[in-house]
Every structure is written in structure tokens, then in C-alpha cells.
Image (spheres, rainbow, N blue to C red):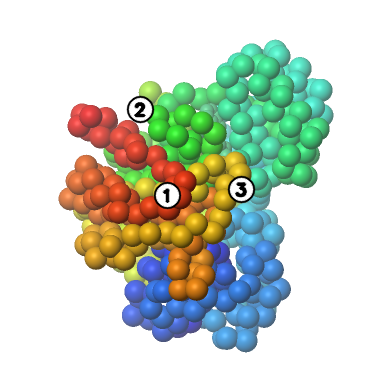
Amino acid sequence: MKVLVVGGGGREHALVWKIAQSDKVDKVFAAPGNAGIAREPKVRCVDIAPSDLNALRDFALKEKVDLTVVGPEDPLVAGIVDLFEKAGLTIFGPRKEAAILEGSKAFSKNFMREMGIPTADFEVFDDPYKAKEYIKAKGAPIVVKADGLCAGKGSIVCKTVEEALDAVDKIMVDKIFGSAGDKVVVEEFLKGEEASFIVITDGENIVPLASSQDHKPVFDNDEGPNTGGMGAYSPAPVVTQKIHDRAMNEIVIPTIEGMKKKGVPFKGVLYVGLMIIDDEYPKVLEYNVRFGDPEAQPILMRMESDLVDALMASIDGKLNECDIKYTDEAAVCVVMASGGYPGKYEKGKVIHGLEEVEKMEKVKVFHAGTKEVDGKIVTNGGRVLGVTALGGTIKEAIDRAYEAVSKIHWENVHYRRDIGAKALRRLGLL
Ligand code: AMP
Ligand code: GLY
């Protein structure tokens, strides 16, 4: 088989790495990929942007690609699946009408209300004045979210009413996220522990992936602004069997059935961002319609089954025949980022120490924002590397990941030093 992976971040490196391990796969193309992806066996990077849907389709037709897998949300929300299917190509993921679960927070919140799916109480506004009146009436803390896609930066958690009023102005008046801010969702602040609950579905059958937990804020102890994710681990002890069952029965199954009822069956990856309240009640923070990044890195590192089988089963409506197996080992991914991210940062810094880490067992460095210049690997984005390690226990995986991290450096590198600490605390190890 020939497989095309769309995207060029850590998630896509993990996808390419895992897909290339399948016996069925002869060749993997990555568009555009990155320096780490380019070095994987069977892989060729092609210089096509994930937003150039027509060029991706033409490339897939020309190369007779058997399966396309889309990493990021933007092409899915823009309708890449519809476009490929129309051209007779096989592609994994939701069609445009179903991808709206991530593409519009106003849609997804109203959908959850309609289906009785637990989520924070909310209202949707297209008038900043009315949004502000609502905020003043509700008080703080409160959360203001831009309706559309904002690269993970569209949700602003506000400790004071002032901050929330300012967030409305930034999103709706200054349009810091462009037309994604034509509407806002203003919602109740939920207190609890977050987890990423990710499933593969064919619109009918559902196969949950291993549980995981992300670390969104940029600094230790969850301080500072939100990022795309500074690290993740799997499994997440906060997702007990009881929470798993509730998440399936109260959230995932009603979501898949609700979409089917609306005449918009959902196929692909459904990633539910959960807030687990009092260790008991999972509520939806958001839906994503693709693998999590960085969560895909530790999850795929633990996956023993052939991922291509699961992706094809989703496309063919045969997920009832699919079982995904994992190693009992835990996996931890520490994201190494450019200093300044998620704000301004410099690119082009030479990365040292990668060869040293390549010699380590049970460690894989997934590349995100990297490129090769004159034989050297340099930084080329905010999140640069996802240093991912397996371990017999979560503690062992954390220690191994940080041992690898300590060998890698570049000017002004930044990473969190507490990835996995929540799991250790929960297990009474910290
Ligand atoms: P979202 O883009 O909706 O996933 O939000 C990004 C992050 O903001 C989440 O991972 C949470 O950390 C935080 N967040 C979003 N909504 C809420 C909420 N209602 N209550 C508390 N924190 C939230
Ligand atoms: N790690 C968060 C996301 O993929 O949206």
C-alpha cells in the first residue's frame, strides 16, 4: 500500500512512524512532513501545504495513493474527505459536515445541549454587547471561546469579569482570530482534572484508544497561557474503568448516535476533551475530530496492533471486527519548544544531542517544528520535538523521557519539568 499522511507535526511523525511499521505498507508520503519524518524508512516528504486540498488530491491521484490519513483539523473542517471521496480516493476521517463538531463550538455546544450530553452551561453570542451583559450577570471565573478554529488558542479562561470583557473585545471587536471570532461561546468554568478520551469510529462501531492526558499551559504547575500541548502520557490513571464507562455511555455513544440521527454520520477519530469533576463526573470541554497532538505520540508508542487495519476498518464500516492492543508499559512525551512559544519565538536554532538520544532504548524523538539545513537539524516552529519514552511504570517512563531531554539542547529551549506529575500524585508517588 501507499499511504499519504497530511501534516508535519509531532502527531504526524508518530502516525508516519507507526504506519510505516505495517507489513502492508510499502511507501509513506508526508505532506509536508519535517526533518524527522524525512529520515524514517519508507518515507518521502512532499512539499504540499495541508491547506492546499486540490494539490493534495492531485498528488494522491498521480501516485495512486491507497490511503490518506489527515493529521490536523483544518483540512478536515475545510472538506478534504469530501474532495478525496469525490475523486474516488480512500481517506480516513470525517466529512466536512461531521467535522463541524470541531469546526464550530457554537454547533457543538448546541448539539450537546440537544442530545443531553454533559458539558459546561453556556450561551452563544454574535453581539459583543450581549455577551458582556451575560458575563456581568454570571460573574467570574468564566470562559470565553471563539466559535471557529484558532489553532488551539481560541479558549480564554478568565479569572475576573474584567478579563472576560476584554476577551470578548479581543475576539469579537479586534478579531484577533479573524472570522473565527464572529461568534463566541461564553461558558461556565469547570473545576476538575482533564483527560483526553480518543476513539476511532466507523459511524456505528466505536473502538476507544488508550487513555491519555495532555498538559496545555506552557509553564510548570499549569501556569501561563495555553499551548497546543506541552506533553502527554498514557495511560491516564484519572480515567478509571468507571470514568471510562461513563465517558462511553454518557458522551461518546450519544455523540455518535446523535450525529447519525442528524443524518451526518461521524467516521474517523473523535477526541473528546474531558473535564472530570470530583473524580466522578466527566463533562465535555471540547470535541476534536482528529488525533491529539501530543497525545498521539505516547498512545501510538504503546500501540502493538497495526494502525492501518483500524483505519481501514473505520473506512469500511468494519470496526466491530477490530481490536487494538497495547503494551502494558506506560509512555510519556515531553514537548521541547522554542523559548517564547506560544507567543513570538525565533527559528533556525541548531539542535544538538539528537544522535546521543538515538542510541537510547525505549525512546523515540518525534519531530514537530524542525527542518534540515546543510545537514543540520534546526528549529522551525513553536513545538519542536516530542521526546517520548516507554517505561514499566509511569515513573520509569518519566525518568527515561527526561534523561533523553537532558541530552538535547538548543539556544533558548523551553520545556515543562513536571510532565506526568499529576499521574504520580494520583498514584501516591509524589
Ligand atoms: P478548549 O479549546 O475548549 O479545549 O479549551 C482549551 C483549554 O481551556 C482546556 O483544555 C481547558 O484547560 C480550558 N478550558 C476550556 N473550557 C473550560 C471550562 N469550561 N472550564 C475550565 N477550563 C476550561
Ligand atoms: N493536545 C490538544 C489537541 O490536540 O488539541
Q: Quadrant of the C terminus?
A: top left
**In the figure, is residue 360 to the left or right of 345?**
left
- Compute the Cα span from label 2 to label 3: 29 Å
Residue 38 image offset from top left, x and y in percent: 46, 73
Q: What numbered label is drawn on residue 151? A: 3
Q: What numbered label is drawn on residue 206? A: none
Indicate the secondary structure of the residue bearing disc 1. Answer: strand
Residue nearer the viewer, 86 or 256: 86
Tell me whether circle 1 and circle 3 mark residues in contact (CB < 8 Å).
no
Q: What numbered label is drawn on residue 279? A: 2
Mark 1 vs mark 3: in front = 1
- Is the residue 428 above or below the residue 70 in the image? above
Neighbours of disc 3 within 10 Å: few (<14), some (14-19), many (20+): few
Q: Quick one: label 2 or label 3, which is nearer the N terminus? A: 3
Give the residue pinned by disc 1: 336
- Compute the Cα span from label 1 to label 3: 18 Å
